[in-house]
Image (cartoon, coloured by chain):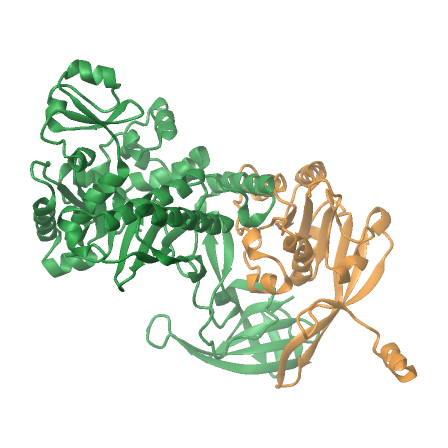
Amino acid sequence: MSGVRTLVVWCPDWPLVAAGLCDRPAAVLIAGRVVACSAPARAEGVARGLRRRQAEARCPSLVVADHDPSADARAFEPVVVAIEAFTPEVEIVRPGMCAVATRGPSRYFGGDEALVARVAAAVDACVPAGAPACRVGVADGPFAAERAARQGLVVPAGGSAAFLSGFPVSTLGDVDLADLLVRLGIRTLGQLAGLPTAAVLARFGPNGAAAHRLARGLDERPLAARIPPLDLTMVAELDPPAERLETAAFVAKNLADRLHEALGVQGLTATRVLVEAEWEHGERLGRRWRLDGTGGRAAGALADRVRWQLDGWMTGSGAGTADRPSGGLTLLRLVPEEVRPDDGRQMGFWGGDRAAAERVARALARVQGMLGPDAVVTAVPAGGRSPAEQVQLVPWGERPPVEAGLRPPWPGRIPSPSPATVHRTPVPAEVVDARLSVAGGPWSAVTAWAGPWPVDERWWDHAAHHRRARWQVVTAGGTAHLLSQEGDRWEVEATYD
Amino acid sequence: MAGERLLPVLSTLEPLFPTRGLRRGSVVSVAGSTSLALSLLAATSAQGSWCAGVGLPSLGLAAAGELGVVLERFPLVASPGRSSGAGGWSWVVAALIDAFDVVLARPPAHVKAADARRLTARARERGAVLVLSGAAGAWPEAAEVQLTVASAVWEGVGRGHGRLRGRRVEVVTGGRGAAARERRVALWLPHPDGSIREVVDERRAHARRVVS
């Protein structure tokens, strides 16, 4: 499954744009190291990762500022508003970068290229004067789209793997893994993508498998993102309404911690969160943030983003002021829209013994490494009439796409108890004069039977259409079978043994 | 959990075992009934143990769920490779014995005596229980506890009416050591209400009702 077609907007040097320093030699520091610098500073030889002294030695007129992420987010708000004119589903990756699924808007605006041109024009119109022009790229999946945005490219659909193949493995952002891969002689994403999936999983574990998927231009995790159950939505009502950012941010921090804890109990981490706020005079605002943190960092990362968002709304400046709410904050809601299993730092599967769960995961990874990822499966209840349809087999480590399907009525469903043996391919049988012969074997008398349960399945699909009747049949030896009859052909579908 | 020497079974199945539970490190064989093999896993699975299934491509997983096996903790290697080395049946079983509390497996037609001895020793060393399902003759060693379903009678189904509701089975136990003495236990597998129960002698129960 290739990634969702995604458009990424990247505003270069955003911390400097937000600080209003992009027109002179300037740098933004975290813990004494340069994390971003303006174009004039770069021309003087300042680069990311330098110490403050080194940077100032290269460029004596350098203006330095400490990094202020909430200022970044505040300044980014008008940009998000501008992009929202194209589609409501904007995800903020971080201040300075956001992503949009292009399927709908591209059709409306006449293709990816046309959409890119319009988005770029709209964004450039609302960034402060003197800021570097934004870059927009489109590719399959957020990872490839981010790379494409840095080059301002539209990668054709299905071409993400080829586009990514030349990038070094350090692009993956996993320092330890990249270091290991380089020492093994795997330097580019193309080389990584060329390795067999099972071997990568066996040698590098789940992180390696995820990196391998990215390198092949696929989404990080197939089928993993799913709509979470409703009860994970966290709501806080504020009475009296919060007028000041500090008060609101305090509530937001608590709420983020609670959400993280609730997800953690289920072994999940959120990859996309909708932050919704209601204000005193009835306004409602909502914004989506994409998260990639796992384990302990996730709670802090989520709280930061909610705070930045509130800061953007409550102390908003510049082009976004039209949307600034007129009263205090009365309600804050966090909705995890996309979750996946938190296998980064798992604190025990399903509340079980942690050591046992880790042993199990290692043993199964070994078997998958030898026999392929699909060799180990777990069963998930599913909807259906026959015993074979009532469970769905999912490769170990993946999540089923939908967990629905149980609810619709299934008329003609075989009642419980279910048969303990469900033949993978039905066994041909013959029934004559209340006697049964299975697979050409000896005849035995039928002592009792129930049915028929007629079913007419998939009549809309010529190839899969079946019209048959099912019977429960008990033979003289006390063996019970589930037979299906189609015309005059009989088959043993399952055995109650 | 690893320190305990017994894994629990449903209370109605306790009479099948001289130890009244699955002794860690033992091998149990079940012949003639897949649902009996599955129901041996139910109690320990419900208490948080991990169980695995090997070489059972036709296992009815809906039935496993109904009998009480927690499907989330019951991964399956349905079709291990054919080779006798890495990836083959005994390699997979050995790999899983290292990590799981109970491994339910159907032996292929010809298990070498050396492989069987090795797996038995491994289960003993790791404290896992190996439950062998399928024909009694496929395993070259004598299992510690051998359960055989000798007869079965279905209830609830008539000649063209009703449906399969409950089944009374007679389980014959055998094995080595304390289990060597043959015993016969009558069970509902399953009872019409879905549970697994001992069969109460109808006449005696009736007499008791009359007296009281």
- Is residue A289 among the parts visible in the rendering? yes
Examine the image and state in which quarter residue A330 appears: bottom left
Which residue reaches farthest top?
A57
Q: Residue at point 50% right, 59% down? A: A380
A173 with respect to A429 (left or right) = left
- Residue A456 position, x and y percent, is 42, 79
Of residues A294 and A50, the one drawn nearer to the viewer in this rendering: A50
Give the position of the C terminus of chain B as an image quadrant: bottom right
Instruction: Identify the chain drawn in orange.
Output: B
Give the position of the N terminus of chain B as an image quadrant: top right
For chain A, give the colour.
Answer: green
Q: Residue at point 14% right, 59% down? A: A107
On screen, residue A83 above or below A94: below
On screen, residue A318 above or below A64: below
On screen, residue A130 above or below A466: above
- Residue A29 position, x and y percent, is 25, 26
- Residue A80 position, x and y percent, is 19, 50
Exactly how many numbered labels are in the figure? 0
- Is residue A270 among the parts visible in the rendering? no
On screen, residue B148 above or below B169: above
Q: Residue at point 45% right, 60% down? A: A231
- Residue A406 position, x and y percent, is 47, 69
A163 with respect to B75 (left or right) = left
A191 with respect to A487 (left or right) = left
Q: Residue at point 26% right, 58% down? A: A327
